[in-house]
Amino acid sequence: MDTALLTRIADALDRLAPPLPPAPDLLDADAYVWQPSPAHLVPVPRVSRVDIGLLQGIERQKRQVLDNTGRFARGLPANNAMLWGARGMGKSSLVKAAHAAANRDAPGALALIEIHREDIRTLPDLLNLLRGRPRRCLILCDDLSFEREDADYKALKSVLDGGIEGRPSNVLFYATSNRRHLMPRDMIDNERSTAINPGEAIEEKVSLSDRFGLWIGFHNCDQDAFFAMVDGYADQLALPIARDALHAEAVEWSMTRGARSGRVAWQFIEDLAGRLGVARPQEDAA
């Protein structure tokens, strides 16, 4: 086959290929969802979040996330962060609330971009799309974890390590997880017990979490913190119920759920507001 024919075939294939997506201007919204195929960002008109003041029982975590996010929004150095720990304690809610707080202090400074766990292997593509954009971007992957034989962590590790290009200066990465090391404990223990060199066998996977500059732990709340959460939500909706009765019902609700957390507190308030006939603004959804 001659060179001219090969050239014509290559040109024809180029014409059939879909055009590369245009670089986003990130001016359509304050939040986006990453869609990798075809690669583009979907604007989110309204982010489902709660006000930072309603997140109770996590004061230390709030200060850390607010400070780190605020510095990044102002163009100062900041760390990638992993928020890990107990379910329902406000990890992703805190990230979204901190994003809103940063934009209140510096309107439009920061775009929030959500990447789904199953798309984490395409994170380098997203970073390339954002590289050089004038707006600063906070990427959030909620409920991040990896299972046995899951190689997607390598894409994240490459991003956190920086690679030859380095992480774009306008991008910060936050992840939430119920697992401190982003993988189940039995997987770590099994690899330790079966490997010739246990330390080296798991180092690559376990060390992934070490590449986050900021680790923020969330733990199950006590009853006082649970009451503070319930009180904050009840006051926001102006529920017509006495404090003693509110707390008594909250205790009963938490016992039926077998847990106390911010999520359980909100679910209780949703049920109570419905029984009391009190509607809530749609934008206040947790």
Image (cartoon, rainbow, N blue to C red):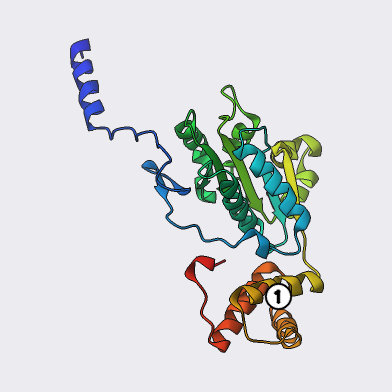
Q: As rendered, which of 229 and 33 lies closer to the eye?
A: 229
Locate the N terminus and report the quarter of the image it occupies.
Answer: top left
Say if 253 sits above or below 232 in the image: below
- Visible residue check, residue 180: no
Q: Position of residue 221 (x, y in %)?
A: 78, 67
4 versus 174 height, above or below:
above
Q: Is residue 5 visible?
A: yes
Residue 151 relative to residue 265: left or right: left
Q: Indicate whether 23 appears above or below 112.
A: above
List x then y, in percent, for residue 178. Answer: 69, 56
Pinpoint residue 168: horizontal percent, then vertical percent. Answer: 56, 30
| Amino acid beneath label 1 | Asp
| Residue 143: quadrant of the picture | bottom right
**Corner quadrant of residue 174:** top right
Quarter of the image where the C terminus is located: bottom right
Q: Which element carries disc 1, helix, strand or loop?
A: helix
In this figure, what is the number of numbered marks?
A: 1
Residue topped by disc 1: 231
Could you say which is closer to the camera, residue 246 or residue 149?
246
- Say which residue appears at 61% left-offset and 61% top-offset: 51
Q: Which residue is pictured at 63% across the width and 38% down the height?
A: 72
Which residue occupies 42% across, 55% down?
45
Q: Residues within 10 Å of mark 1 (few under 14, many from 20)?
A: many
In front: 223, or 19? 223
- The location of residue 234, given as percent across then percent down, is 65, 77
